Image: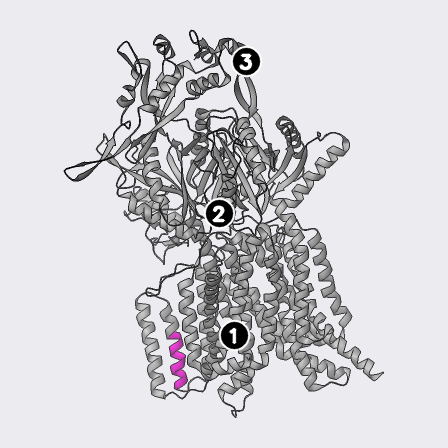
């Protein structure tokens, strides 16, 4: 069936052309890289930075204003938690009870559908028994989003027409604009779940009643409450018909102004009316707030846009931006005293688009460079320009086919998913290389008796089985990745899909597109000589025109045209022409690599990058050529010295095993998001103003670092169920500048410079970027010109924006970082240095997306911690503090980052009502508490309706009469008979410490001890060190675990343990599946085992490379001023899930060469039927000699294609590099299997020969 399809397409080339057009067009439509074809519609794959690996979670959020955490826990959180535990699919329930609200996090099993679970929870909430919750308390489901849905943050600022900050707007004005205009406009954008406001002041009408005046008029608080409620009401009175016309009747009574409330009647006696204004003062003021927002030291108003579950983040952000553009022109403006016009402007400060674009830019660049390198390998090693054009031309088609499959199967494009294509590029090319090499060999051997179609078909059919087997081993080896569960499953299943799609696409391209196009390209052409002259003349003319327009591509066109003309004049042979064209093509690719790869860095000249790229590419290819040249000699020696040779791979395997046992472990390498999240905390007793002061100090300190783009700090929470932060918790979102200025697509942009290397600005000024090294000649010129014209040359570092520079593809990159800042870690260290403030805890190194995921998975704000469970909060806190002191001594733990929750640290003012005393006055507990609730806390009694805006009306005592306990004692409580009684007669007031927040898990109270690791230590090793130290203290009696208390390490460490258990099953399963495929190919256990040895050797090679990466001496020397360890991002690599996925990918390709070699060995032996040892070895050498070139080409493409990944420094490279290292090291070492398989095959054949003779 397969061969019939191949034959059909070879004979019907138009069908192949149509298939090619279909794949290219459809793939371009679905591509995630925002390609603008100009005429094709765009329907891209959903795009995000990383997969959402958070838990399957729903939130039940309940407000109960003014209530303490203990009241919330006892009356709301605990009853609700016990009721919700019975919902189908519930894995665990975490909760937090805080001042004024309860948050319950229902963690569900992964297979529970998101919206189905919401409906089940709503059913449960609607069927709660009466009396379970306090009266008037209504629990509600949180937004249909996850913590990863916080994709866009912005502030509202007054700005002029030039975008300069003007101010002129009060915080309450901006908050009203946000709450009643901007919020709803952005909420209407497709894909938005909610827009949550924070910062500024929520405006309300405040009625401050004077208790003395109330006593004089014999008025009680409940009279005032009644009067205010009844003063704000509209009614409808049906309709009236007048003159056959129907009129709707409305009774108007909504409060429209302060005077409306002031004139509300409280009571009347003896024709004297007592109004609100007679017993108090009405004003507009701020409501109590539990959240602050600060931007670089100035308080601001802002909000966060949350994407709906399952929505395409990139699309949602674009929809939001469209709404902002529509909305901006209609936002309020005012003329300031200085004559400037200040327009309210929406200013983003966190936009995930940047991270997504930079991540895709990194992958786009890596894929492009990989394709260029594989083309170079094909040109040099196949040494046939037509074959090279054929393979390299169809490779991008396979990538486009992957995008089609991703869209069809709903696989999102992100750093992990697209890495599947990046690590599969080499294997994708291998298939085409093997097939093309076989076609060329058959054409060379053909005597001209067969048609080109027959030759191509026969050569394709000969290797199609081996190709399918080799690729199927790789595809099926990845099936176990689909079995992964939890966070690692969500993270790597997309990669397994894309790698499978990529390899399937490579088979389709190799077997169904390459043969028909090969039959076309390799046919003998009969083109008239004059037409060839004209064609090459046009080629040269186009080259000259292109050069005139400043494009070096013209030189290549001329270089191709001239040898062709010389060939027509018989001055050079066809072979020489082909050789010249190959040299031109290789040189052009090397130049393109030097230009766009820039491995030595963009600050190094194109010359040095060209030299380095040439050396590394041609050096490796030269090494492979020598390998081919001397292969048969080495193979003969190995056949003569089998035991001595086999001791080498055996030693490598043993070394790899020991390295594996001693390699540190972690769950996942951290993705560099281009931003940090600083999350320190202050003391629980700190109030609003103190937290505001500290927050502003933190923001101003961070903003003083030159590499920082923006810093916006949040204290407390947004108005969202997704944000349960207390007021003492800070979240400073820090956006730092990229190392080099980027364009709108997240790619490095070049800017115009003059002959002295100075950047030209649009206003005519020249800027010397001190962040870039300047040569001595330019430095001299600078000093000379500085004297001549100091106004033009700016030698100091200025805060230059990309909009000021002139884009120019022939210019230079503009570096944003100071010379001493070499990595984001250096920026973080600067942040830590400037944010050491008294009374503020240190914070672990966090990033926005990473932190949201960690908080969703563990309930804490750090990737590592200890969970302490118990029944008593004080006991939990005390034990947590003990653990804090102990683990500070553990090896690998950053001491300053260790912090145990101070649970019971919030000051409480308790009013203890004496039941006997209130009984004497005939007053109930409820009556006293109602007075307290209104007088002290204030009560929102009604809400005004002012157009689209709604403002509460609050009644309370004036601030000066409720500012301290002495004032509270003077609050008067009405009694049934007689004058009101002061509170001091009915209750005692005392101070006490209580919880700021009460956290629980499955109804058990819980506290956390947070910690972080030092750089250079593996996550699992640090946790194991801490575990061992705690156990040692327990065994020695220095630490006693109280009864009812238990502790467990939590965080990403738990993910690692689960992933390790899964991998311990899936890795052997992958190996077993590969062995079965090999067996079905060869139908021989012995041959299958021989090929299988390639996996053991490659496996060891991967670990050897990991070990070398961690050795300071390895490649520790400079080339053109660039250290090779820095160039290849060399640092200690821990054994993470990403590395294991890299090994699984390696297992699939490690057998490819063995399969090809063993297949041909079997064919050779069947053909030659050797009868003695000499003939056996001759047949072995013959088979090896004929298959070494294709085998080595496939290995070369795999190894060289990974070089751009290994040197990549862009967003996402943190995850790609650990996945690429096993394949790179494994395939380098696996070259030895090109000798192992023939040697073992010879050994087996010789033994069989001896037995046969006996």
Between residue 191 and residue 1015, name the one nearer to us.
191
Disc 3 to disc 2, C-alpha distance:
59 Å
Residue 324 appears in which quarter of the rendering?
top left
Query: Quick check: can you spot residue 961?
Result: yes
Near mark 1 (Cα within 10 A), the count class, few <14, some 14-19 or many ≥20, is many
Q: Is label 2 in a helix, a strand or a loop?
A: loop
- Examine the rendered structure and indicate whether residue 1160 appears above or below residue 796: below
State the image coordinates of residue 412 (x, y, percent, origin top left).
Answer: 48, 57
Spatial CA span between label 1 and label 3: 89 Å
Q: Which residue is mark 3?
A: 915
Label pair 3/2, CB-CB below 8 angstroms: no
Residue 510 is labelled as: 1
Q: Nearer the viewer, mark 2 or mark 1?
A: 1
Instruction: Kindly state the secondary structure of the residue where label 1 is placed.
Output: helix
Q: Is residue 1035 above or below residue 271?
A: below
In the image, the segment drawn in magenta is 558-570
- Marks 1 and 3, the one that precedes in the sequence: 1
Q: Nearer the viewer, mark 1 or mark 3?
A: 3
Return the disc, 3 or 2, that comes first in the chain's sequence: 2
Question: Is 1039 above or below relative to 735?
Answer: above
Q: Position of residue 1078 (x, y in %)?
A: 67, 71
Q: Main secondary structure of the magenta part?
A: helix
- Residue plotted at (31% across, 20% down): 282
- Residue occupying image coordinates x 46% and y 61%: 407
Query: In this rendering, which labeled residue sits more in front, label 3 or label 2?
Result: 3
């Amino acid at each position: 069936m397969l061969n019939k399809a191949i034959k059909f397409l070879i004979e019907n080339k138009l069908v192949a052309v149509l298939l090619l057009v279909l794949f290219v067009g459809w793939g371009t439509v679905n591509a995630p890289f925002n390609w603008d074809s100009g005429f094709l519609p765009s329907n891209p794959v959903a795009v995000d930075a990383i997969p959402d690996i958070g838990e399957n979670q729903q939130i039940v959020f309940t407000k109960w204003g003014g209530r303490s955490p203990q009241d919330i826990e006892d009356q709301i959180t605990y009853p609700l938690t016990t009721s919700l535990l019975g919902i189908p699919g519930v894995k665990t329930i975490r909760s937090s009870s805080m001042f004024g609200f309860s948050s319950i996090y229902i963690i569900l099993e992964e297979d529970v559908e998101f919206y189905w679970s919401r409906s089940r929870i709503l059913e449960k909430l609607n069927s709660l028994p009466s009396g379970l919750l306090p009266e008037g308390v209504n629990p509600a489901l949180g937004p249909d989003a996850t913590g990863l849905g916080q994709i866009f943050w912005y502030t509202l600022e007054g700005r002029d027409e030039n975008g300069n900050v003007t101010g002129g707007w009060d915080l309450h004005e901006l908050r009203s604009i946000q709450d009643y205009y901007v919020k709803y406009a952005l909420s209407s954008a497709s894909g938005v779940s909610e827009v949550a406001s924070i910062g500024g002041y929520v405006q309300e009408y405040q009625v401050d009643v004077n208790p003395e005046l109330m006593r004089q008029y014999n008025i009680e608080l409940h009279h005032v409450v009644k009067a205010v409620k009844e003063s704000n009401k509209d009614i409808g009175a049906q309709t009236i018909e007048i003159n056959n016309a129907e009129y709707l009747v409305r009774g108007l009574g909504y409060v429209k102004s302060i005077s409306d409330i002031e004139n509300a009647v409280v009571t009347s006696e003896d024709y004297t009316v007592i109004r609100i204004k007679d017993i108090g003062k009405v004003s507009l003021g701020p409501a109590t707030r539990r959240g602050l927002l600060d931007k670089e030291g100035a308080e601001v108003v802002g909000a966060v846009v949350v994407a709906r579950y399952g929505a395409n983040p990139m699309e949602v952000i674009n929809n939001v931006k469209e709404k902002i553009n529509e909305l901006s022109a209609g936002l309020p403006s005012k003329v300031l005293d200085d004559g400037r016009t200040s327009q309210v402007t929406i200013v983003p400060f966190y936009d995930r688009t940047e991270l997504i674009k930079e991540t895709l830019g990194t992958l786009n660049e890596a894929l492009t460079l990989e394709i260029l390198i594989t083309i170079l390998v094909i040109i040099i090693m196949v040494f046939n320009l037509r074959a090279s054009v054929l393979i390299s031309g169809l490779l991008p088609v396979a990538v486009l086919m992957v995008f089609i499959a991703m869209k069809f199967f709903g696989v999102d494009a992100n750093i992990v998913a697209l890495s599947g294509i990046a690590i599969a590029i080499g294997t994708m090319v291998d298939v085409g290389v093997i097939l093309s090499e076989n076609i060329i060999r058959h054409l060379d051997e053909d005597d001209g008796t067969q048609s080109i179609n027959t030759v191509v078909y026969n050569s394709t059919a000969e290797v199609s089985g081996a190709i399918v087997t080799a690729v199927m081993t790789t595809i099926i080896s990845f099936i176990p990745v689909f079995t992964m569960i939890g966070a690692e499953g969500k993270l790597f299943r997309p990669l397994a899909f894309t790698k499978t799609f990529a390899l399937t696409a490579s088979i389709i391209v190799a077997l169904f597109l390459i043969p028909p196009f090969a039959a076309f390209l390799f046919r003998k052409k009969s083109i008239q000589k004059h037409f060839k002259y004209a064609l090459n003349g046009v080629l040269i003319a186009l080259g000259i025109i292109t050069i005139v327009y400043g494009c070096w591509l013209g030189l290549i066109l001329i270089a191709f045209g001239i040898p062709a003309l010389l060939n027509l004049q018989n001055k050079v042979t066809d072979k020489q022409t082909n050789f010249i064209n190959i040299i031109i093509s290789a040189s052009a690719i090397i130049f393109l690599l030097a230009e766009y790869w820039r491995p030595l860095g963009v600050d190094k000249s194109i010359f040095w990058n060209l030299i380095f790229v040439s050396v590394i590419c041609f050096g490796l290819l030269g090494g492979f050529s020598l390998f081919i040249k001397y292969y048969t000699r080495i193979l003969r020696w190995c056949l003569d010295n089998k035991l001595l040779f086999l001791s080498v791979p055996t030693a490598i395997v043993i070394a790899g095993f020991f390295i594996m046992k001693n390699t540190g472990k972690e769950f996942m390498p951290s993705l560099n998001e281009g931003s940090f999240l600083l999350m320190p905390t202050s003391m629980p007793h700190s109030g609003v103003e103190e937290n505001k002061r500290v927050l502003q100090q933190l923001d101003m300190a961070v903003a003083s670092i030159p590499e920082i783009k923006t810093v916006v700090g949040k204290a407390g929470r947004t108005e969202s169920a997704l944000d349960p932060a207390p007021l003492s918790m800070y979240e400073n979102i820090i956006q730092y500048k990229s190392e080099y200025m980027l364009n709108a697509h997240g790619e490095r942009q070049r800017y115009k410079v003059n002959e002295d290397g100075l950047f030209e600005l649009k206003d005519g000024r020249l800027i010397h970027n001190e962040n870039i090294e300047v040569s001595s000649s330019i430095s001299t010129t600078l000093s000379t010109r500085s004297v001549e014209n100091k106004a033009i040359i700016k030698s100091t570092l200025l805060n230059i924006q990309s909009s000021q520079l002139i884009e120019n593809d022939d210019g230079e990159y503009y570096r944003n970082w100071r010379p001493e800042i070499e990595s984001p870690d250096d920026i973080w260290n600067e942040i830590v240095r400037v944010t050491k403030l008294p009374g503020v805890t240190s914070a672990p190194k966090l990033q926005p997306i990473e932190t949201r995921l960690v908080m969703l998975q563990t309930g804490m704000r750090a990737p590592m911690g200890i969970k302490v469970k118990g029944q008593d909060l004080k006991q939990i806190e005390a034990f947590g503090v003990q653990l804090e002191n102990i683990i500070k001594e553990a090896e690998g733990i950053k001491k300053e980052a260790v912090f145990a929750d101070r649970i019971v640290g919030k000051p409480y003012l308790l009013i203890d009502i004496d039941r006997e005393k209130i009984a004497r006055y005939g007053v109930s507990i409820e009556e006293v508490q109602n007075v307290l609730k209104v007088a002290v806390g204030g009560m929102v009694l009604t809400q005004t309706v002012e157009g689209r805006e709604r403002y509460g009306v609050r009644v309370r005592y004036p601030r000066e009469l409720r500012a301290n306990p002495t004032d509270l004692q003077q609050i008067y409580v009405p009694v049934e008979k007689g004058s009101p009684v002061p509170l001091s007669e009915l209750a005692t007031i005392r101070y006490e410490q209580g919880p700021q927040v009460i956290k629980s898990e499955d109804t058990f109270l819980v506290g956390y001890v947070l910690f972080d690791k030092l750089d250079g230590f593996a996550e699992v090793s640090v946790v194991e060190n801490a575990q061992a130290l705690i156990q040692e203290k327990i065994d020695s009696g220095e630490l006693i675990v109280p009864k009812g208390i238990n502790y467990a390490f939590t965080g990403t460490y738990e993910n690692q343990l689960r992933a390790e258990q899964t991998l311990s099953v899936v890795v052997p399963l992958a190996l077993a599946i590969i062995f079965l495929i090999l067996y079905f190919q060869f139908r021989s256990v012995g041959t299958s085992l021989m090929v299988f040895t390639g996996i053991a050797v490659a496996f060891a090679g991967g670990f050897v490379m990991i070990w070398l990466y961690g050795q300071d001496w390895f490649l520790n020397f400079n080339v053109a001023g660039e250290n090779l360890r820095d160039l290849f991002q060399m640092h200690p690599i821990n054994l993470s899930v990403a590395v294991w996925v890299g090994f699984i990918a390696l297992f699939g390709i490690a057998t490819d060469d063995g399969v090809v070699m063993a297949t041909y060995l079997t064919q050779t032996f069947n053909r030659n039927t050797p009868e003695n040892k000499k003939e056996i070895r001759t047949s072995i050498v013959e088979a090896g000699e004929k298959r070494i070139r294709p085998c080595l080409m496939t290995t070369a493409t795999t190894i060289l294609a990974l070089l751009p990944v290994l040197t990549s420094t862009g967003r996402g490279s943190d995850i790609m590099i650990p996945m690429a290292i096993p394949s790179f090291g494994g395939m380098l070492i696996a070259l030895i299997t090109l000798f192992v398989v023939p040697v073992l095959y010879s050994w087996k054949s010789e033994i069989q020969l001896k037995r046969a003779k006996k």
